[in-house]
Amino acid sequence: MLLDKKDRLGTDPMNLLNELYNQCQTGRIELHRLDKRSLGRFTDLVNRIKKRDPYIEAMDVLIVAYSMIDKKCRSLLTFEGKLINSRSLKDLIFEHIQDRKGYTITDRPRI
């Protein structure tokens, strides 16, 4: 949504922040944050993902780790082949997500 408006917004950080704020106010974007209890688990998963698969990009590591600690998240929808096909990431998910057996990283949305 923000990318579609790039021409109008330009690259000025204040314009981008104002647009983000407006999108949050209208309910089109929902922001989440980590609570103190989840922060330790999050940083642990970030370090484990980076150690097991150093080829995953930094932002992808953060996204995967956050989805893994979010109790409501059932899967991560992505078209990033490195994430979908990573054997070490699949092993890590199997080891660390016992409370959500169906959790997966996939390119197929569940309907």
Image: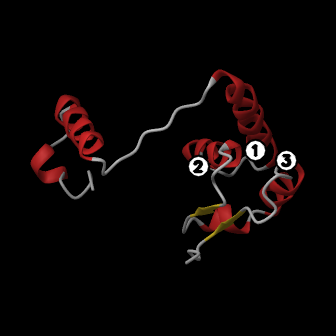
Which residue was labeled with disc 2?
A: 60
SS class of the residue under badge 3?
helix
Left or right placement of residue 84 versus residue 80 in this view: right
Disc 2 packing (10 Å; few <14; some 14–19; many ≥20): some
Q: Count how many numbered circles sit on residues in the image.
A: 3
Distance from Cα at disc 1 to Cα at disc 3:
11 Å
Q: Mark 2 and mark 3 in contact (Cβ < 8 Å)?
A: no
Q: Residue furthest top?
A: 36
Q: Mark 3 points at which residue?
A: 96
Circle nearer the N terminus (3, 2): 2
Tell me the residue at 35%/47% (across/down): 29
Inter-mark Cα distance, 3 to 2: 18 Å
Q: Is residue 17 found left or right of 75 in the rendered image?
A: left
Residue 107 appears in which quarter of the rendering? Answer: bottom right
Residue 44 x, y percent position in the rendering: 77, 32
Q: What element carries label 2?
A: helix
The tag earlier along the polypeptide, 1 or 3, is 1
Find residue 95 and report its horizontal and vertical position in percent.
89, 51
Amino acid type shown at disc 2: Asp
Amino acid at dot 3: His
Residue lying at 40% horizontally and 44% vertically, measured from the top left: 30
Instruction: Please name the residue that numbered disc 1 is placed on.
Output: 49
Q: What residue type is labelled 1?
A: Ile
Q: Residues within 10 Å of mark 3 (few under 14, many from 20)?
A: few
The N terminus lies in quadrant:
bottom left
- Mark toward the viewer: 1 or 3: 3
Q: Is mark 1 on a helix, strand or loop?
A: helix
